[in-house]
Amino acid sequence: MGAINSIGVIGGGAWGTALALTAARAGRTVCLWARDPATVSDIRARQQNPRYLPGITFDEDLNATAKLAEVADADAILLVTPAQTTRTILASLKATGLVRGPVVLCAKGIEQSSGKILSKILSEELPGIEPAVLSGPSFADDVARGLPTAVTIAANSAKTALSLCEALQSPTFRPYASIDLLGAQIGGALKNVLAIACGAVVGRKLGASAQAALTARGFAELNRLGIAMGAQGETLTGLSGLGDLVLTCSSSQSRNFSFGLRLGEGFMASELISAGGKLAEGAYSARVAVKLGRKYEVDVPICETVAQMIDEDLSIDDALTTLMARPLKAESGML
Ligand SMILES: NC(=O)C1=CN([C@@H]2O[C@H](COP(=O)(O)OP(=O)(O)OC[C@H]3O[C@@H](n4cnc5c(N)ncnc54)[C@H](O)[C@@H]3O)[C@@H](O)[C@H]2O)C=CC1
Ligand SMILES: O=C(CO)COP(=O)(O)O
């Protein structure tokens, strides 16, 4: 793979825009595709994305388009739409017949209908195109404002991971290379589910001790399932795993945490989901995490509880009673 000079970003939401700005700051030629024409014209004409990044005006003159073919033949593509749209967008990309560079998966989720990770979907929809993953503790708003951030960029080959790191590095954005494509995806998907649980604990005012306990036991789940699926332990304790878990389990800036906060305040998941609102990827990943737990014979009680809160409107008080009444066990492994 040669040097990465041009970057196509697919997705005109908060994270797509923040990553397009990141690539521009790193000196790349960037074009961002958004399906919403108003987003395209706001970015082009006003250097703003007021719907998804309110209050931010960019210094960078970003190029935006509503034509997918205009981003498809870039040296590398960042795919930054919600996880459940991945297959459809990849099929549209394939139809352009132009894709050649690696596709960097930036969504944090698992396909609900199949339980497949996003790199598996890429291999099915665009066989022969190199997959990569960008993940880690990074709020779009922070990144768009140029606050310092570090992330993991994983690919099957170290050369590709390093080329992508070089292509996106800037004084405020520091990527670390990894060859654990699977591990980098698992952390990002599961931390969203666990952040919903932490938000619920805070919304119900159960205290900082409960929040810390849930974060640590949540990490135990993420780690057990990740290892069983074949991830490397170092990835799960790194930026894309523990790093992102800590961020999203502790900040109401996280949409997943905020979704959980509302559950803790007494709203039912069905009410929140039917009201629309901001994307909370964990609401889509919770049930899939439970299915993966069964498949790999790993206990995931917090994910199970979140799945019940989402699918069955289990209340926070009933959720707490269920979790606290579980049989006593060793903290890790066997006693
Ligand atoms: N916002 C953040 O701080 C971060 C988000 N992410 C991940 O990035 C992914 C995207 O998140 P955001 O950009 O924040 O979401 P967002 O809600 O801000 O934007 C989603 C974008 O996807 C577009 N979109 C939705 N369905 C589409 C479809 N079928 N076809 C084409 N475009 C479609 C929307 O029009 C919108 O532009 C998620 O998986 C999220 O977990 C990852 C790191 C940070
Ligand atoms: O992934 C994120 C930060 O790393 C963003 O989290 P939310 O999707 O919960 O806002």
Image (cartoon, grey):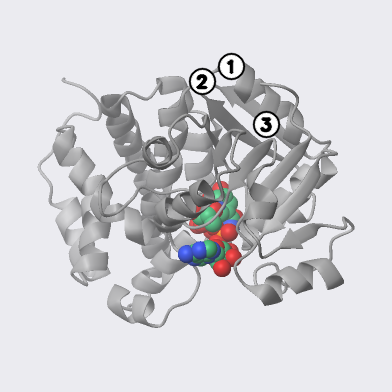
Q: CA distance from mark 1 to mark 3?
A: 13 Å
Q: Amino acid at mark 1?
A: Ala
Q: Name the foreground residue: 124 vs 192.
A: 124
Residue drawn 50% across and 21% down?
A: 156
Q: Is residue 135 visible?
A: no
Q: Position of residue 198 (x, y in %)?
A: 40, 56
Q: Amino acid at mark 3?
A: Pro
How many circles with numbers are drawn on the protein? 3
Task: State the residue position of label 3.
Answer: 175
Q: CA distance from mark 2 to mark 3?
A: 13 Å
Q: CA distance from mark 1 to mark 2?
A: 6 Å
Q: Residue furthest left?
A: 327
Q: Name the foreground residue: 281 vs 35.
A: 35
Assess disc 3: are there few (<14), some (14-19) or many (≥20) residues with their C-alpha within 10 Å of its C-alpha: many
Q: Earlier in the sequence, mark 1 or mark 3?
A: 1
Q: Is residue 200 visible?
A: yes
Q: Is residue 110 above or below residue 68?
A: above
| CB under 8 Å between discs 1 and 2 | yes
Q: Where, by quadrant of the figure, is residue 4 drawn? A: top right
Residue drawn 46% across and 28% down?
A: 181
Task: State the residue position of label 1.
Answer: 158
Label 3, secondary structure: give it: strand
Task: State the residue position of label 2.
Answer: 179
Q: Is residue 310 above or below residue 4?
A: below
Q: Position of residue 316 (x, y in %)?
A: 26, 67
Q: Amino acid at mark 2?
A: Ile
**Ligand number 1: quarter of image:** bottom right
